[in-house]
Image (spheres, helix red, strand yellow):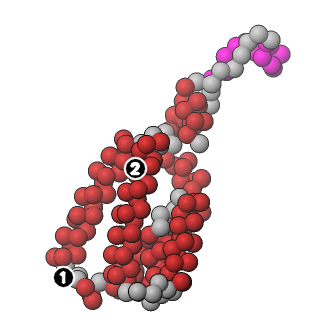
Amino acid sequence: MLINPFFALSGFTIGLLVGLTGVGGGSLMTPLLVLIFGVQPTTAVGTDLLYAAVTKSAGTVVHHRRGTIDWQVTRRLAVGSVPAAILTLIVLYKLGVRGGASPPLITIVLACALILTAICVISHRQLRMLTRPRHAFRPAPLRGSVNDGGIRRGDDIRPDASSQTSASCG
């Protein structure tokens, strides 16, 4: 079987971008397969899922060994995403969306997801402000005496725990 060099180059480029940015390969590879290579959306999604399962499994092992996985966050995400994925499959099955009927739906959902991802990437700072705990916005209390509009020598200003937390988060 002859390997199409454009597929290999695309895989290399997507791998490079994922490695540099941490952006999921599916948000890059699936549109590439559909728009550039003309692969049917259902086949592109299935192919990408298999590829992602293999590469993410290897990445998980590496990150686990390095201690760079927050398993508590992983569990929290799974509590929402696993039931949502199962529910979506059940609803699609009940609606009779299978095989040839699903490409338009997949294309629309994929387009919406990519637009939403682009918006989130562009506005990530504003989104982080929304997700920070409210107490992180309180100014640190001044400690010490005020003398002629200034703080006397020997007194210090120490941030409270909430501002230390917000500084470490971002």
> Mark 2 or mark 1: which comes first in sequence?
2
Over which residues does the magenta segment extend? 141-152
Dot 2 falls on a residue whose secondary structure is: helix
Q: Say the numbered circle drawn on residue 72.
A: none
Q: Is residue 24 magenta?
A: no
Specify the amino acid type for callout 2: Val
What residue sits 76% from the left and 10% below the top? 154
Residue 42 in picture, x, y percent from top left: 33, 81
Q: Is residue 108 above or below residue 123?
A: below
- CA neighbours of label 1 inside 10 A, class few (<14), some (14 to 19), many (20+): few
What residue sits right under mark 1 in the picture?
Answer: 96
Identify the residue at image location x=31%, y=52%: 78
Query: Would you identify the image quadrant in which residue 122 lies?
Result: bottom right
User: Left or right of 30: which side holds 106?
Assistant: left
Residue at image location 57% in from the left, 72% down from the top: 13
Is there a contact, CB below 8 Å, between mark 2 and mark 1?
A: no
Q: Is residue 85 visible?
A: yes
Specify whether 106 is left or right of 131. left
Q: Nearer the viewer, residue 120 or 28?
A: 28
Q: Which residue is mark 2?
A: 61
